[in-house]
Amino acid sequence: MIDNFYILTEWRNSFLIATATETATESEQGTFILAGVLLSLVVIYFASKLGGEVCSRINLPPVLGELVGGVLVGISAFHLLVFPESSAAEKSLIMSILQSTAGLPTEAVTSVFATQSEIISVLSELGVIILLFEIGLESDLKELIRVGPMAAIVATVGVVTPFVMGTLGLIYIFHTPAIPAVFAGAALTATSIGITAKVLAELGQLSSEEGQIIIGAAVLDDILGIVILAVVASLVKTGEIQVNNIIYLVISAAVFLIGSILLGRLISPLIVGLVNEMKTRGQVLLTGLVFAFILSYIATVINLEGILGAFAAGLILAETEKRKELEQQIIPVADFFVPIFFVCVGAKTDLSVLNPTVASNREGLIIATFLILVAILGKVITGFTVFGNPDLNKLAIGVGMIPRGEVGLVFAGVGSASGALSEATEAAIIVMVIATTFVAPPLLRLVFKETDTIAESVDKVQE
Amino acid sequence: MIDNFYILTEWRNSFLIATATETATESEQGTFILAGVLLSLVVIYFASKLGGEVCSRINLPPVLGELVGGVLVGISAFHLLVFPESSAAEKSLIMSILQSTAGLPTEAVTSVFATQSEIISVLSELGVIILLFEIGLESDLKELIRVGPMAAIVATVGVVTPFVMGTLGLIYIFHTPAIPAVFAGAALTATSIGITAKVLAELGQLSSEEGQIIIGAAVLDDILGIVILAVVASLVKTGEIQVNNIIYLVISAAVFLIGSILLGRLISPLIVGLVNEMKTRGQVLLTGLVFAFILSYIATVINLEGILGAFAAGLILAETEKRKELEQQIIPVADFFVPIFFVCVGAKTDLSVLNPTVASNREGLIIATFLILVAILGKVITGFTVFGNPDLNKLAIGVGMIPRGEVGLVFAGVGSASGALSEATEAAIIVMVIATTFVAPPLLRLVFKETDTIAESVDKVQE
């Protein structure tokens, strides 16, 4: 057993003076921690696959299934994956399993629970970092620059409208404190490029003019959303909203993102040259990850988000000849780490606050309803800001921006972990993300069908 | 920042009553832990690639470079990657970097250091588990059963001879206590199937009769080595050598390995059927890992090694139609985790005990010399136990079994982590592993050259 080093040293030291019983107990603590981590990973992967498979069968994005799977194994249902912040060690089913199968002694439960929960938390943090690195790799900086003012307008309106409507609505209608209101508003700005692109591809609309505008705006939205997330999360840390602070953060986010991309473009030929010289296994993957981890570290150190650095690293490396290879190799690593993040987000969501039979919960439900309305309206109107071509299906553009998907869940996860959100607001955001992502694929199919019918009749006339 | 959940709860709770300063400090602890883990990973990958690339250029196995790279960044040299067992938090260069770049406060250094070291340790434990899963996937159970008695004899003699010579020599010549002597003896039994197979392929001898015997024996040796590792590591836990204990462990290792393989073969069509039904990303990889983690957990619970379960899972899944796909997908995951293990083993090796100018160190050096002699002699004589074909290059068979490689390092790592080995014995084992793996490729080239010359003259005569 490669036991926990720290505990083993204590054990090694105590070995000389301790009785056999004491020795066994302390030595086994490391074994129990590893066993707990292994069991937690089994539970996480089981939940993510169960949820993902069910969702993919009913034509919904698998990532939603991972979240729902997390809810099932988490604090809201089976108590398999719970964290010290919301549950006592004794209520963790994994600790009970360790006690009954591995003989974990009662007095060690609390410390084993705390340590294995910390490890799962850091694995889930690495999960978001790797997810954003992957999203960066899949984004296209040149496409971003190439897409015209229309995509920029759609993206900007689609960020500003729901943010302002959501934040002000929460503050003035629901009397929510400023920080959670800003966080919920920020969560409304995201657009899931992954889900949108997938749905468009399924409808064969990826290369239509509407499709091009949606994809361009979603790419911009992705970056805007990450900057907003970084700004909001940093605001949470400082504890209040200060204009100086916002300006400093917006500037440092912009300087970091633009600076790292410009500098990265200068350095990336060197990185590619270095990788081409390397002969050992994993040279592309590990060089890419080292680059992502260094930028994540720098972003963290200057009070931005680690994920912003990982995203910038992905964007930079997406422009090199190593993109395809890196995209291929990051897939299994992301498959390993990313579900840990989504399942943990679901597991920590206490859906009991949404039980309408409890009077005090109605606040969360009303907030959720409000957020869903703002989320849909705030994106649908963006389509109508598009000028030029009057034949454009403006409704389709707006509807295409609706799904919040992964990016919205990242907001919920970050907000949840930072402690800025009340349970009601947190659950309301997740319900909003689920609702928008659920509603977008069928809605998009509906609004594009009209165009198809028109296109078909045009085709028939031309025949 | 997805902060550490546990710390954040405390922070969330304290938020209501604490001053702004206290809040910032506690909230940032999670950020520092993640930043420390990111920096440690950057250091680990840098060390593994630096060492690996240098070694691959001078025709040595890259894995040795990872170990040497680990020595460079570890306790013996630059103090970047150190662990609480052997170093104070203040001596960790990563903590110093966090203090100067990220503003880690002095009072938080010890707890951040302890937590991030624990996380790196568990990541390195996951590294061995994934490595052994991969080795299992690359092994061939049918080839194992097919290879005749010769491979079995070579494997058995090659395990028994160095084990007995090493253990008894240490006990009677060096007066080493029984447990470390058994551990060092066990480390002498390993054969690196990876290094051996690679060298044979380079020499074009993989399909020669000698090559077939070497590969067959190395596969058997791999399993014998793992059983021995499990037995020895379990013995370390109980603190003494008891015949009952050995019998129980040998039987439970055999029952677990044979039982899980027989049961696994029954279950594996169900697993393959399930995977074929699945539609979401990572279904092959995650199903394989869940299987490996469950078997690891069971092996851990019945007092065997987690790695034995991962190896059994690999062997079972290697027989299914998913082998190729799984082998492909496990590569990037192994590239991520496995270097953490090897670099950590190197980083924890305190080579200062091998400084010959210090009188008290000479013991380690003498042990190392003895182990290297036993390691080479114990394997070389195995070739001469082969009966039948008198034209066989018996010396080549023995030399082919010399490299200890990854498997030997796994022994060193497990021994080091379990605290069973004295620093001198631990360093001596690593020096032995390095020496045998260094010496095997050129030696093998030398002894096969003779055969080549003979074969060429035969060819010429036939012409």
Image: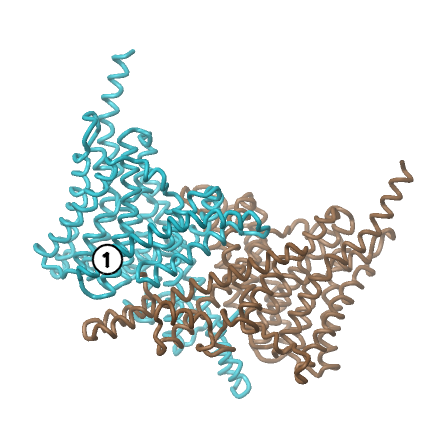
Chain colours: A cyan, B brown
In the figure, B269 relative to A211: above or below?
below
Q: Which residue is found at the position 85% from the left and 53% from the top?
A: B388
Judging depth in this view, the residue of B126 and A137 nearest the camera is: A137
> Which residue type does callout 1 highlight?
Val
At which x and y percent is residue B204? 74, 46
Q: Chain under label 1? A: A
Judging depth in this view, the residue of B174 and B136 nearest the camera is: B174
* Res A219 seen here: yes
Judging depth in this view, the residue of B120 and A231 nearest the camera is: A231
Furthest-right residue in view?
Answer: B461
Q: Quadrant of residue A424?
A: bottom left
Quadrant placement of the C terminus of chain A: top left
- Left or right position of B384 against A277: right
At which x and y percent is residue B29? 33, 70
At which x and y percent is residue B462? 90, 38
Residue identified by numbered label 1: A232
In the figure, A138 relative to B4: above or below?
above
Question: Judging from the image, what secondary structure is the residue with disc 1 in?
Answer: helix
- Left or right position of B439 against A25: right
Q: Which residue is found at the position 36% from the left and 63% from the top?
A: A121
* Res B234 seen here: no
> How many numbered marks does the figure carry?
1
In the figure, A187 relative to A237: above or below?
above
- Left or right position of A238 against B289: left
Q: Which residue is found at the position 37% from the left and 59% from the top?
A: A124
Furthest-bottom residue in view?
Answer: A17
Q: Quadrant of residue A238?
A: bottom left
- Left or right position of A48 against A372: right
Judging depth in this view, the residue of A400 and B325 nearest the camera is: A400
In the figure, B240 relative to B142: above or below?
below
Furthest-top residue in view?
Answer: A463
Quadrant placement of the N terminus of chain A: bottom right
